């Protein structure tokens, strides 16, 4: 089983630390308000981080971000408020639907769900419309942090497969477990984010920059590419 060498962590920090997302882009109470976290996650789908935050700010300027308010919000006004984030037709419907279901199932309070044991909490979260493995895990990081939960998106999926941590047909849970095992537990919160930034900026889907990757000696993809080029 591959594990990340602790000696490589300062190298990752030096290279990708400057790319770290600024905390002031997000609502101050995001870590204590899981409903706002849900809305941010919906708005982040299939768009850039900048557009996601722009859409959230547009929404917050027009509406109070609570399930009670958004469940009653006018659909057209919702669409206009989040237009800058893209896919506003789909996302406005999802926001209204989620708000209604969270009110009906949980009385508008997701904190009670997130206080449950991890697997039970995830099961309940995935009963919500449009909430899959990744989104549920993003919400679970509020309680359990990246030490226990790594939400697997396309960047993590690509990285795990290129490193050879899992096979190419590996499913979500297998990829998540492999990433958790790969990163030393005592540094997992921070390093999980640094590896995501590595995947985004270096281990790109198209034209990966293998030549500048700090962990290329561990990489099955890079070794395969070198052999094929000979």
Image (spheres, rainbow, N blue to C red):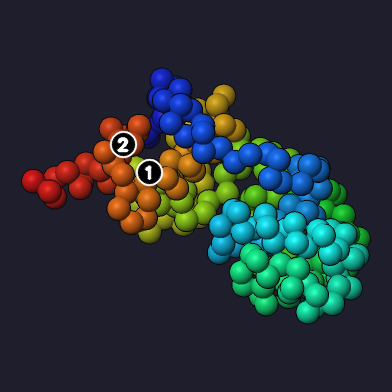
Q: Report the residue that reaches farthest toward the left.
A: 230
Disc 2 residue crowd, few under 14, some 14–19, many 20+, Cα 10 Å? few
To which quarter of the image does residue 54 belong? bottom right
> Residue 159 location in percent, x, y?
40, 46
To which quarter of the image does residue 15 belong? top left
Q: How many marks?
A: 2
Q: Is residue 172 rendered to the left or right of residue 88?
A: left
Query: What residue is shown with label 2?
Result: 212
Which of the pair 158/173 is nearer the observer?
158
Q: Judge whether 20 appears above or below 171 on screen.
A: above
Q: Residue at x 47, y 34 (%)?
A: 16
Q: Report the residue that reaches farthest toward the bottom.
A: 76
> Dot 1: what SS?
loop
Can residue 18 be seen?
Answer: yes
Query: What residue is shown with label 1?
Result: 202
Q: Residue at x 74, y 73 (%)?
A: 80
> Dot 2: what SS?
helix
Q: Earlier in the sequence, mark 1 or mark 2?
A: 1
Q: Judge whether 17 appears above or below 100 on screen.
A: above
The span from disc 1 to disc 2 (Cα, nearest Å) is: 7 Å
> Residue 43 location in percent, x, y?
67, 62
> Residue 204 location in percent, x, y?
37, 51
Answer whether labels 1 and 2 touch (C-beta < 8 Å). Answer: yes
């Amino acid at each position: 089983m591959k594990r990340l060498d602790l000696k490589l962590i300062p190298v990752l920090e030096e290279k990708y630390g400057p790319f770290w997302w600024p905390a002031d882009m997000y609502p101050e109470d995001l870590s204590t308000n899981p409903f706002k976290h849900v809305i941010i996650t919906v708005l982040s789908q299939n768009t850039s981080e900048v557009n996601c935050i722009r859409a959230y700010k547009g929404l917050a300027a027009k509406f109070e971000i609570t399930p009670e308010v958004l469940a009653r919000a006018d659909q057209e006004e919702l669409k206009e408020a989040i237009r800058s984030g893209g896919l506003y037709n789909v996302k406005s419907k999802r926001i209204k639907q989620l708000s209604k279901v969270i009110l009906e199932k949980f009385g508008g309070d997701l904190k009670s769900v997130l206080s449950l044991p991890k697997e039970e909490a995830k099961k309940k979260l995935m009963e919500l419309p449009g909430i899959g493995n990744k989104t549920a895990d993003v919400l679970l990081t509020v309680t359990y942090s990246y030490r226990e939960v790594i939400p697997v998106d396309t960047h993590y999926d690509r990285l795990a497969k290129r490193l050879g941590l899992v096979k190419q047909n590996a499913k979500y849970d297998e990829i998540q477990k492999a990433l958790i095992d790969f990163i030393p537990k005592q540094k997992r919160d921070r390093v999980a984010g640094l590896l995501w930034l590595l995947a985004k900026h270096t281990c790109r889907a198209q034209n990966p920059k293998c030549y500048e990757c700090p962990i290329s000696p561990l990489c099955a993809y890079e070794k395969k590419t070198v052999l094929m080029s000979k």
